[in-house]
Image: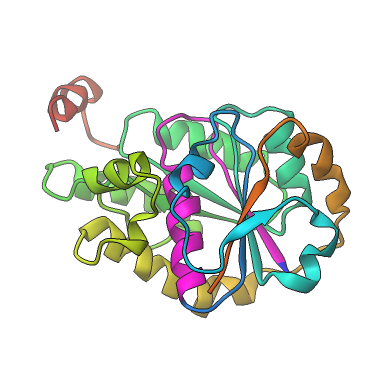
Amino acid sequence: MKMITVANPKGGSGKTTTAVELSAILALRGLNILLIDLDPRQDALISCKIKPEGLSLATDLGEIAAIYDFVFVDTPTAKNVMTEQAISLSDALLIPVDFSVSAIRVAKQFAEEISIPYWVLPTHFRARTRFGKAYLENLTQEFGPKLLSNPIHSSVKFAESAAEGTPLALVETEARGLADYRQLAEIFVNQIAGQIQMRPKDLSLLHPLLSAKPATEKIIPAEEGVDLNEFDEMMKGV
């Protein structure tokens, strides 16, 4: 069992969408996935009210290693004890970085504090804006091989499906952003998973964090050379 925390202190980076959709897509591929929601807003749990066949609540973490292929942890915005504890127990970190001026700075500072393997995922990408290419180039410059090559395109369908309590992967086939997450799942299975080494971990340390929250959910079956003021104006109304 390999444990991956999805975290970024910046709000609006796509943490919950990434945790929910990646978990659902991998589960649909036949992997056993546990999704743990540590965010007090419970967005991941709310997004999974309508569950794939075989999905159930899981409250006992003692047998996780024997049951699940991967555990994904959705974390709160801001770096607090929940996020720090989850990272300390994880084998790897996935950092979603949204398409905004401050996102790269926050993500870079966050990544510098991390001692476990991590990857950076561009989210809320808008290819039709003239700063899209410059933004990706800047991300590449900052994170190099840690940057995943497939940005997740922005789509209102993610918010709509979350409001209905259903992962978009269960109901939609055509959304561009969903296709991006399916590509991410391929990269995860074929490239990233093999690079993640399992570390010894005491999962009982998660119990105090989960005791004040709903049960966890089990799922089965920005820029160099760019004027920042101009960038902000360009992003208005996008």
Is residue 182 rendered to the left or right of residue 6? left
Q: Position of residue 13 (x, y in %)?
A: 42, 38
- On the image, which quarter does residue 227 sit in? top left
Which image quarter holds the N terminus? bottom right
Task: Establish if 238 lies above or below 154.
Answer: above
Rendered residue at 41%/42% (across/down)? 14
Q: Nearer the viewer, residue 143 or 197?
A: 197
Query: How many numbered callouts?
Result: 0
Residue 130 part of the magenta-drawn span: no
Is residue 42 rendered to the left or right of residue 96? right
Q: Position of residue 197 (x, y in %)?
A: 73, 69
Residue 17 part of the magenta-drawn span: yes
Rendered residue at 36%/70% (across/down)? 183
Rendered residue at 83%/52% (across/down)? 203
Q: Nearer the viewer, residue 109 or 193?
A: 193
Task: Establish if 224 lies above or below 232.
Answer: below
- On the image, which quarter does residue 215 sit in? top right
Q: Nearer the viewer, residue 18 or 146?
A: 18
Task: Establish if 46 lies above or below 133.
Answer: above
